[in-house]
Image (spheres, grey):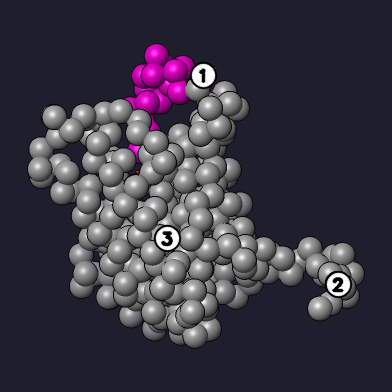
Amino acid sequence: MSDDLAPHGLGAFAASMFDIRDKVAIITGAGRGLGRAITFGLAAQGVKVFLAGRSQKTLEAAAGELEELGAEVGLQPTNVGDEDDVIALKDAALDRFGRVDILVNNAGINPYYLPADRTDLSQWQELIDVNLTGVFLCCRHIGPAMFGHGGSIINMSSIAGQVGLGRAAAYCATKGGVEMLTRDLAIDWARHKVRVNCLAPGFFETDLTEGIQNNPALSDKINQQTLLGRMGRLEEIAGAAVFLASPAASYMTGQTLCVDGGWLAR
Ligand SMILES: NC(=O)c1ccc[n+]([C@@H]2O[C@H](COP(=O)([O-])OP(=O)(O)OC[C@H]3O[C@@H](n4cnc5c(N)ncnc54)[C@H](OP(=O)(O)O)[C@@H]3O)[C@@H](O)[C@H]2O)c1
C-alpha cells in the first residue's frame, strides 16, 4: 500500500483527478439544452466530442461553435429510439475518432403534463421510446465499444426518477426505468471496466421547462421548494458530467448524482 498521494506535487495531483483530455465522448441531445452544456463542458476539458440528436441544423450549429473554440468534433443526426440510427451513430463515431470512452445518454422529452388517467397509450409510448428505449439502445450498441479499455456511461435521469412530481406519469416512469437500467448495467459491465451512473437534474432553464418558466405561479412554487431558491443554469450541469466521466469518479458506479439545488433534501 502506498500512502503517497501526490508524488509529483499537488498541482499534478489536481490535474490528474479530472484529466480526460483526448478521450472520446458521444453525447445524445447535444445540440441544445443540458446536452449542449455537457458537450461544451467535456470539450473544455479536451475531450473529442461526437454530437447526436434529431436536428442536423442544431447539431451543425453547436459543432461549428465548438470547432471555432478549438474542439475536435463529429456529428450524426440520430433518433435514439431507432435501433438502426443508433448503430449508425456508433459506426460514425468510431469512423471519426476510432474509439469511444464516454457516452452521455442525455436525449429526452417531456411534452405532456398529464396524470395517468389522461395519458393516451401513444403519449406513454412516445416517452418510453425516447427516454427509456433510447437509453437502452445507446448502451446496448455503444457500451460494448468500451469493453476492455473501459469507459464511463452517464445516463440522464431526473429528480423525477427518485420522486413522483404529479402530472408526469410517463416521464417519472421512464426516469425510474433509467435509474434501474443504470444499476443493472453497472453490475454487468464492471468486469468490462465500464462505469455506469445517472445524473439527476432538478429544474433547469431549457426548452423542456419552457412551460414552467412561462408560468409565474408554478415557477414560484418550484423556486420555493428548491433550497437554493431558483432554477439551475445551463453551465451548472457541466461540472457534474465532467466529474462522472473523469478519474475523480473512478470508484463510482451504479449511482445517481443529483444536481437539483437541494430539491430532494426535503
Ligand atoms: N431541463 C430540466 O429541468 C431537466 C430536469 C431533469 C432532467 N432533464 C433531462 O435532461 C435531458 C435533457 O433535457 P433538456 O432540458 O436539455 O431538454 P431540451 O432542451 O428539450 O433538449 C432535448 C434534447 O434531446 C434531443 N432529443 C429529443 N428527442 C430525441 C430523439 N428521439 N433522438 C435524439 N435526440 C432527441 C433534442 O434534440 P433534437 O430535437 O434535435 O432531437 C435536444 O437536444 C433529458 O433527458 C431530460 O429529461 C432535464
Task: Answer few, some or many: residues within 10 Å of disc 3's Cα (few below 14, many 20 plus, some between 14 and 19).
Answer: some
**Main SS of the magenta segment?**
helix
According to the picture, the residue beneath numbered tag 1 turns out to be 224
Mark sitting on residue 101: none
Q: Which residue is mark 3?
A: 183
* Inter-mark Cα distance, 3 to 2: 31 Å
24 relative position to 184: left or right: right
* Mark 1 surroundings: few (<14), some (14-19) or many (≥20) residues within 10 A: few
Q: Position of residue 78 (x, y in %)?
A: 28, 64
* Residue 83 rendering spot, x and y as whole percentages: 21, 69
Q: Secondary structure at mark 1?
A: helix
- Furthest-front residue in view? 1
What residue is disc 2 on?
3
Query: Callout 2 environment at 10 Å: few (<14), some (14 to 19), or many (20+)?
Result: few
Q: Is residue 245 above or below residue 211?
A: below
Q: Residue type at mark 2: give it.
A: Asp
Q: CB of residue at label 1: within 8 Å of ligand 1?
A: no
Name the spot of residue 2 as percent of width and height, x first: 84, 77
Three-letter residue code for mark 1: Gln
Callout in the foreground (3, 1): 3
Specify the segment rendered in magenta: 206-223
Q: Judge whether residue 209 is colored magenta.
A: yes
Secondary structure of residue under mark 2: loop
Nearest to the eye among marks 1 and 2: give it.
Answer: 2
Separation of residues labelled 1 and 2 (CA atoms): 45 Å
